[in-house]
Image (cartoon, rainbow, N blue to C red):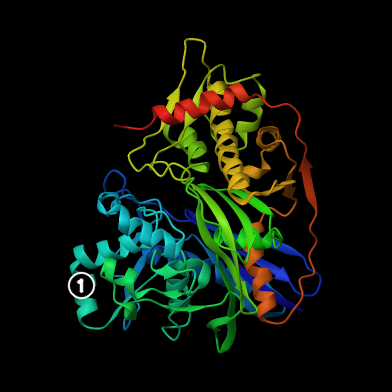
Amino acid sequence: MSYIIGLDVGTTSVRSCVYDVNDGSFQMVKQKEVDQIYPKPDWVEEEAEDIFLSTRMCLNEAYDKVDGDVIGISLTNMRETVLCWDSVTRKPLYNAIIWQCRRTKDFCESMSAQTKRLIYDKTGLVVDAYFSASKIKYLIDNVPKVREALEAGRLRVGTVDSYIIYRLTKGENFVTDVTNACRTMLYNIHTMSYDDELLKIFGIPREILPEVLDNDKVFGFADFGGNRVPIAGVIGDQQSALFGQDCLEKGSAKVTYGTGLFMLFNTGDKICHTDKGLISTVAYKVDGKVTYALEGSVFNAGTAIKFLRDNLGMITSAAETETLARSVTSTNGVCFVPAFTGLGAPHWKSEARGLIYGLTRGSEKAHVVRAALEAMAYAARELFDIMQQASGIDLDFVKADGGASENKFLMQFQADQLQVPVKVPLNKEATVLGSVKMCLKALGLAYKGGGELLSFLPETRDDETYELWLDAVKRCLID
């Protein structure tokens, strides 16, 4: 019996899954939450050591569970998050700065239009605090321990994948993959390499950054009591979901509902630029060939449900939202824009703030909960429309995954808004499954699992409510 352990290091939790190479069965073994830290408004951090220890715990539990040989470990992770550590002690020098963190927004906004255009042309990315480069610059400029390590030649900086691999391989491998590298704002997606001009703009030495590998390579070996297991199939979480959902043909698309909402549209071997607020990104690189994608990144989606639960106490679990949403026929005019950390695609407004709009004396808890769910569908529709316009391709369907894809009310409402079928895999672990499939490819093995889908067909669409939501989005901007 042979197995692959899939690791998913997400924004608020780490998960491990086990894939049986022989029969294609797949199951989650362990999930461990990671606490977020908010030192100041708009700042979001996590303890780097907590991220690693949680990952190691999930990995060990999965390894101990299997009755057979573990032949590979795959890894998918939240992107853009930055970690820094000492190359000798392998210990972190500062908390992880999470992708949601907005501390560098003023620096990003201060850049000239010419510089912003240069960065976009090279990287496909809108200049924003979301991406990694300004976070790295902040660490070098503001954290004494980081500066000391840099001067001593011991500083290592990378995204989550680099840090986890470095720790698992006991410092033997300082590497990343193309899908994480292309989110740093330092990586040229035309030349597929770090760009000297970009490194100079941000004041970042090339030697502190990891080597970039293709997704279907072996990234190192983790040791389990003398048993060295290859780490392969490393890929950023949203690209992993695209691969896991088999969106491998040009014109195929998926939307993932997680902490944020992310829609990726496969554009094949072509980089598709647009001035409508979407970014171009590397989808994956296998067999030496690069596949690109258009992406729309919405910073807050599942966070709206957590806000209703943890901050307002309207619900005790996410599962309640479907019943509450169905208990009313509409939101009764309530609109929810969860811009807790600003607006991402297609607006890219750091100064935006969340808004619940349209409340009256007749508003009830169910109206607010339904509005939070509808907001996800509206955000996806906004991206969907732009992607079709930019690519000139009409999409026949969209695949959906992530925690909120289990909400049948949302999936039906999403299909109604997009006016195309929304297909949801019965296997809810599409993100980690993509990295497992990539690991199999790296090891020269075939994937044996099924691809059963549950389809939601479009019925009616209320364009008026969508227009009301778009108006609410405009209202949440702060002058």
Residue 89 in which image quadrant: bottom left
Q: Position of residue 34 (x, y in %)?
A: 45, 56
Q: Position of residue 253 (x, y in %)?
A: 66, 52
Q: Residue at x 43, y 81 (%)?
A: 174
Residue 455 in which image quadrant: top right
Three-letter residue code for mark 1 = Arg
Q: Position of residue 238 (x, y in %)?
A: 57, 58
Residue 95 visible to the viewer: no
In the rendered structure, the answer to whether residue 445 lies left or right of residue 388 reads right
**Relative to the observer, which residue lies in front, 202 or 316?**
202
How many numbered tags mark residues here?
1
**Relative to the observer, which residue lies in front, 340 or 61?**
340
**Relative to the observer, which residue lies in front, 452 or 347?**
347
Q: Residue at x 47, y 66 (%)?
A: 182
Residue 336 visible to the viewer: yes
Compared to residue 106, the image places residue 82 above or below, namely below
In the rendered structure, the answer to whether residue 97 lies left or right of residue 11 reads left
Q: Residue at x 59, y 77 (%)?
A: 232
Q: Residue furthest bottom?
A: 226
Q: Residue furthest top?
A: 361
Q: Residue at x 56, y 68 (%)?
A: 235
Residue receiving disc 1: 147
**Relative to the observer, which residue lies in front, 2 or 111?**
111
Q: Position of residue 288 (x, y in %)?
A: 61, 79
Q: Secondary structure at mark 1?
A: helix
